[in-house]
Amino acid sequence: MDGASGAFVGVVAVVGLLSALVSPVYLAAEGRSFFRAPRARAWYYFGLNLFWAALLAIPLVNNLGVAWLLVEATTGASALLVAYSGRRSALEAGWKYLVLTTFGLTIALAGILVLYVGLAPHGGVLGTLDWQSISRHAHLLPAKDALLAFLLIVGGLATKIGWAPVHNWLPDAHSEAPPPVSALLSAALLPTVILVAWRVLVTLGPALRAGVGDATFMAFGLASLAIAVPFLWRPLPWKRLLAYSSLEHMGVLALGIGFASPLATAGVLLHLAGHALAKSLGFYAAMPLLRHQPESAERPPRGIAKLSAGTAAAIGLSLGSLGGLPPSPLFFSELLILIGGIAAGHLVVALIAAALLGLGFLGLAHALIEGLLGGEQRRAWSRGRSVRVTEGLATVIGLSLLALAACAYLLPGSVAVRMLMDGLT
């Protein structure tokens, strides 16, 4: 456990616990499954706990090869969960997710093999791929081998992270998975794999030409923002909208890592936690939404404020926070990342990112207004279990988001940021 591991394990632990707690509410209303009825719940919890356990282990392992194995293990467990409902669209999404991410991880494995062959004479048979060994011996690699290994590993992991332009599985998987699983996919899986790519950048980066590693992350970040924005402006079903929001926010994290300044690192830490809470709440709000308004799976929700005040509060808090509406912690984290980019000398990249974030905010703001206030008057929903659970989560997560926003004034230069940077180096 180091500073970096602690931050990511904390996020995975909280999101996983929340998903485990709300799963009975989802299962009580879910009428069909890919698995046979008598064993459907057992398979669901088996997959969920296996998925969660692998996510908790990834930040804690001290070896790139073992981290790759655990990332691959998350694929099998989560693919079954994506297809859990048994609908044709869910089976297609699960298969697409399995094939595309496995293909990407195979490319990453090729990069790991290139790295292993280059470092084996220096690191020993077993310790070659330990993070400390890679950091100590990376400068001994030929420049071309180091660049090839870096691009293959990070490019392959980008498929699992969902960075553009290799994000094709992400909207379908997030849309079709059970809401508790969608929360784990977006708020826990994607950032956890980013940590592996970040460690590769820090340990292997010194063997590359100056700025190449950081530029690669910034390129993925800008591409993800640019591709997400047009979709955020379109009328989308609720969970699909959240999926494209994930693409945008993974791009923000990539930019913060690529800027590689203390302010940007502080922003990454704050953004990691704020995104996890806000995005999880958004997916949990899909449970009462889909139960009372099943057509929301195919088209945008409308007029939720007239139907259920509790669900509307959860949706408003989630989307407002994800859009960066003050006092959302994501507003402060994005500001820290952009200022950190300017301080690091990447003014043009920061200005382009700021413009794209502004456009993304406008798209999410329009979706929020239409989702809460648009549509025709209909009968109000009954205040059932899913609505009550969503109200409780909105209260707890709302207070947590406010606490994170308060931390934004204390985070730059704090012990937490120094621990994170020390852990990575």
Image (cartoon, rainbow, N blue to C red):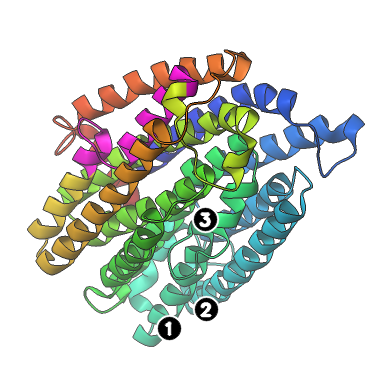
Q: Work out how far the residue at label 2 is from the one at label 1, CA to CA, in angstroms.
A: 7 Å
Secondary structure found at label 1? helix
Q: Work out how far the residue at label 1 is from the one at label 3, CA to CA, in angstroms.
A: 20 Å
Name which residue type carries label 1: Asp
Which residue is found at the position 24% from the left and 59% from the top?
356
Quadrant in the picture for residue 37: top right
The residue at which mark 1 appears reads as: 145
Residue 327 sits above or below residue 254 on the image: above
Considering only order in the chain, which callout, 1 or 2, is on the residue closer to the N terminus?
Answer: 2
Residue 204 at what x, y percent from top left?
36, 68
362 vs 341, nearest the viewer: 362
Considering only order in the chain, which callout, 3 or 1, is on the residue closer to the N terminus?
Answer: 3
Name which residue type carries label 3: Asn
Are the residues flagged by discs 2 and 1 in contact, CB closer than 8 Å? Answer: yes
Give the class, few, some or many, for how many residues have Cα within 10 Å of label 3's Cα (few <14, many ≥20).
some
Residue 63: image tag: 3
Are the residues flagged by discs 1 and 3 in contact, CB closer than 8 Å? Answer: no
Most common SS among magenta residues: helix
Name which residue type carries label 2: Val
Count of numbered circles on the image:
3
Which residue is found at the position 44% from the left and 54% from the top?
244
Query: Which residues are the magenta region?
Result: 307-333
Residue 175 at what x, y percent from top left?
59, 48
Secondary structure found at label 3? loop
Q: Work out how far the residue at label 3 is from the one at label 2, CA to CA, in angstroms.
A: 15 Å
Give the class, few, some or many, for how many residues have Cα within 10 Å of label 1's Cα (few <14, many ≥20).
some
The residue at which mark 2 appears reads as: 114
Secondary structure found at label 2? helix
Answer whether residue 301 is visible to the viewer in this image: yes
Are the residues flagged by discs 3 and 2 in contact, CB closer than 8 Å? Answer: no
Q: Is residue 314 magenta?
A: yes
